[in-house]
Amino acid sequence: MAKRLALTFRTPEGRSRTLYLPDPKDSLDSSEVHQLMDAMIGSFVPSDYQKDRAAVIDTEVNVFFDLIQ
């Protein structure tokens, strides 16, 4: 099962941008995520965006076929 950290930012007008970071550490806590998102605003995310949501997403991949390797 793969995990991703989804970080969603939103403008006052309602536009949103979500960044996905692969393999977040299991010990990640809310304060670390707040600090990370604060650091991203103005560098990876435009400065008019604000923190909106953060979540760890677990995904399970069921491969039907993989012909080209």
Image (tube, rainbow, N blue to C red):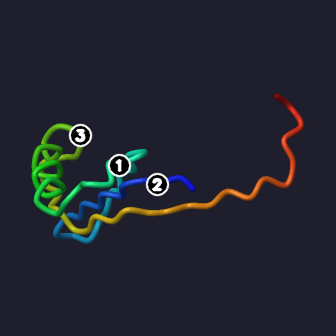
Q: Which residue is mark 2?
A: 3
- Cα separation between marks 1 and 2: 7 Å
For the point 36% across and 58% down, which residue is it? 6
Q: Earlier in the sequence, mark 1 or mark 2?
A: 2
Q: How many marks?
A: 3
Three-letter amino acid code at the position of disc 1: Pro
Expressed as whole percent of the image width and height from the top left, the position of residue 44 reads 23, 40
Separation (CA) of disc 2 from disc 3:
21 Å
Of tags 2 and 3, the one toward the viewer is: 2
Q: Are marks 1 and 2 in contact (CB under 8 Å)?
A: yes
- Helix, strand or loop at mark 3: loop
Mark toward the viewer: 1 or 3: 1
**Residue labelled with disc 3:** 44
Reading the image, the residue beneath label 1 is 24
Q: Amino acid at mark 2?
A: Lys
Q: Earlier in the sequence, mark 2 or mark 3?
A: 2
